[in-house]
Image (cartoon, rainbow, N blue to C red):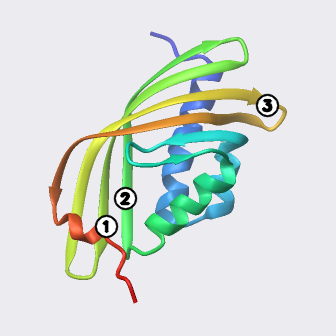
């Protein structure tokens, strides 16, 4: 199968979002999403880009390190809309422990004047290993 420019550009947005989360580059992460984007995270929903960013900061910002590996990306482009299915493995590290999770990203993107932007992201975990307490924020 030959990958066209749109498919490559859409895939690049998924990779950029992972890099932004791992580097805590919130401006780069914001650039991956449309202002009206929606996030569905199994246990929570974010109704726009600002809520998505707040969720990412609150969840990832408390960890010492993360690494999100995105693969098996399937892209379907229909005019100015694209849908994707991708798999992920995400490592979450806090002093003394780690939590590893694998699952799926199902995204919808829209072509804009500034490039492709995620308009809907659905994240579903399939498996996990390690200490889930790593993901818990301590109450002070």
* Of the pair 48 and 12, the residue shown nearer to us: 48
Instruction: Specify the label residue 43 is tagged with.
Output: none
Which residue is under mark 1?
135
Give me the residue at 58% from left, 34% from top: 120
List x then y, in percent, for residue 60.
45, 66
- Is 88 positioned to the left or the right of 20 in the image? left
Numbered disc total: 3
Number of the front mark, 3 or 1: 1
Q: Mark 2 to mark 1: distance in Å?
A: 14 Å
Number of the front mark, 2 or 1: 1
Q: Where does the C terminus fall, quadrant-wise?
A: bottom left
Which residue is under mark 2?
67
Image height of 64 relative to 121, above or below: below
Give me the residue at 46% from left, 62% from top: 22
Image quadrant of residue 37? top right
Give me the residue at 23% from left, 56% from top: 100
Image height of 12 relative to 50, above or below: above
The local crowd at label 1, few if under 14, some if 14 to 19, many if 20 or more residues have their Cα within 10 Å, is some
List x then y, in percent, for residue 61.
48, 72
Q: Mark 2 to mark 3: distance in Å?
A: 28 Å
Give me the residue at 52% from left, 60% from top: 56
List x then y, in percent, for residue 27.
69, 61
Which residue is under mark 3?
112
Q: Identify the element where label 3 is drawn.
A: strand
Q: Are marks 2 and 3 in contact (CB under 8 Å)?
A: no
């Amino acid at each position: 199968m030959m990958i066209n420019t749109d498919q490559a550009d859409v895939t690049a947005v998924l990779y950029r979002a992972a890099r932004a989360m791992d580097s805590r580059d919130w401006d780069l992460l914001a650039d991956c999403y449309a202002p009206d984007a929606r996030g569905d995270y199994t246990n929570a929903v974010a109704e726009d880009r600002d809520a998505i960013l707040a969720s990412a900061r609150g969840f990832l910002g408390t960890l010492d390190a993360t690494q999100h590996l995105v693969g098996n990306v399937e892209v379907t482009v229909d005019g100015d809309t694209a849908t994707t299915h991708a798999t992920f493995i995400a490592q979450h590290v806090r002093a003394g422990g780690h939590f590893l999770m694998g699952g799926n990203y199902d995204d919808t993107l829209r072509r804009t004047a500034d490039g492709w932007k995620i308009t809907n992201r659905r994240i579903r975990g399939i498996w996990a290993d390690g200490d889930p307490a790593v993901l818990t924020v301590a109450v002070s």
